[in-house]
Image (tube, rainbow, N blue to C red):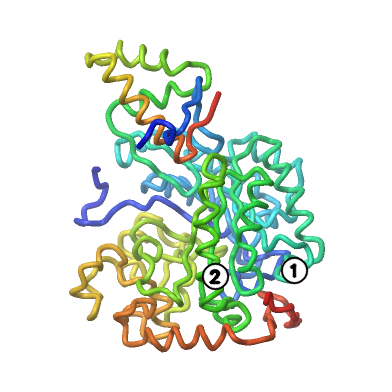
Amino acid sequence: MTTPFAVAGLTAPLGLLAELTHRCPLACPYCSNPLTLDDRSDELDAATWARVFCEAAALGVLQVHLSGGEPASRRDLVEIAAAAHAAGLYTNLITSGIGLDVARLTRLKELGLDHVQLSVQDVEAASADRIADYSGAHTRKLSFARSVTELGLALTVNVVIHRANIDRVAALVELAAMLGAGRVEIAHAQYYGWALRNRSALMPTREQVARAMQDVEQIRPHYADRLSIDLVVPDYYARRPKACMGGWARRSLNVTPSGRVLPCHAAETIPGLRFWSVREHSLRSIWTESPAFQAFRGSDWMAEPCRTCELRGEDFGGCRCQALAIAGDARATDPACELSPHHARMLALAEQDSTDAEIRYTYRGRRLHADAIATPSR
Amino acid sequence: MPDSDLPKLPDRPRLAPGVRLHFDTTRDAWVLLGPERVIETEGPASEILRRCDGSRTIDQIVDDLASLYTADRTEIASDVTDMLRELVTKRMLVAG
């Protein structure tokens, strides 16, 4: 592979997550958006997004994920998606399915949208709507999924897994198959931002996680000819950390609604990092020179036990945001690793949270923190 | 692996919905793009994939390749079959 960069070892990014807006009709308690949401008045306009997509393609990005918030909350979504396609990027729409009618979906398909990823909260409408804090959401999502497949668009169903739905992973996979998805993501909640705030309401027990992982492996062969099942593994009960983002500033970038460019969507939780904006800098200079992207690139920043670990080139020390959240230091080894001195405490936190009998959410972005109580799943 | 475990090949293969072939100028290579997937292709792979459009049979694809490359047809046929099987397993190739 040729490298377009003067700096040795610096690779080109493959993916760009475009958070078009933080606005969303849903209020899922594990939302990956930051606790402080960008205002509508600060959002980049469609022309700026078009420039960002061209710069991304020139930098080596192959896939763009139009996300949010709910990207359909942007009235100019079709224009923005058209610009992504025109830049030659594989264009994926990540949506809740709410606020996107068949007419607009048809236009997206006609202009070259490659793929749709739809979030589903649960198999039962009452539970799903309670998780999203939006009455009627589940039914509308099912009908949206049908429109996607009827138009011949490729569909992935994404389900974030937590204590209120973890006992139904097999049924969730079956729902995805029934909806005509070619792929389903069973994504165990990642505890940063909103999910960290809601951890005691979301964390499953160790036994639930083990059973859910077993269930998926058991049913996987049954779907081999029609559905790919991708797992995002839970790391509070893990022994080794995940290769978060495939390594810091190594494969992808994330542009916030107001134009700040981040190595991952939780990166702003790390104090002291400076993020450059596409309003002032080209994507190329952000990727190659910006301080936030340089901060944890490669392995020079690592301390022990990562520094001399033979797996450092595989897991990259795990997740920086999780190291900060649990160990209190973004440079520390991800406590999901059993070699971390904080590993036992992380496991204890999970076990303690998972035994909370009551599920009480702090919903994302709701002005009045209207809490809801769900029945524990067992 | 016994034959019965091998995935069945479609008569006239085409790329699955959401999958497309793209020339990546940065990396100077043909890549196959799918949901959360980027597969870099090498050598004749792109020539094979370009012909998976749902109109050609696998035999026709092999014939085409045999006219492009000097290798033995049997060898080409086995390479094509292996590659297409792998893509069927990854659900990136379907019947035309």
Q: Is residue A378 above or below residue A157?
A: below
| Marks 1 and 2, the one that precedes in the sequence | 1
Q: Chain of mark 2?
A: A
x 56%, y 46%: residue: A223
Residue A66 drawn at (x, y percent)? 57, 52
Image quadrant in which you'd find residue A371: bottom right
Find numbered disc 2 in the image and state the secondary structure of the residue it sits on. loop
Nearest the viewer among A97 and B69 is B69
Q: Quadrant of the C terminus of chain A?
A: bottom right
Q: Is residue A254 left or right of residue A164?
A: left
Residue A261 drawn at (x, y percent)? 45, 64
Query: Which mark is drawn over residue A127?
Result: 1
User: Disc 2 designates what residue?
Assistant: A189
Q: Chain of mark 1?
A: A
Q: Is residue B88 left or right of residue B30?
A: right
Graded by Cα atoms within 10 Å as few (under 14), some (14 to 19) or many (20 or more), the crowding at tag 1 reads some
Find numbered disc 1 in the image and state the secondary structure of the residue it sits on. helix
Nearest the viewer among B28 and A234 is A234
Residue A67 drawn at (x, y percent)? 58, 57
Mark 1 residue type: Ser
Q: Is residue A328 above or below residue A366?
A: below
Farthest residue to the right: give it: A136
Q: Quadrant of the N terminus of chain A?
A: top left
Residue A17 drawn at (x, y percent)? 50, 57
Q: Is residue B42 above or below residue B70?
A: below
Graded by Cα atoms within 10 Å as few (under 14), some (14 to 19) or many (20 or more), the crowding at tag 2 reads many
x 44%, y 32%: residue: B4
Q: Is residue A258 left or right of residue A282?
A: right
Image quadrant in which you'd find residue A317: bottom left
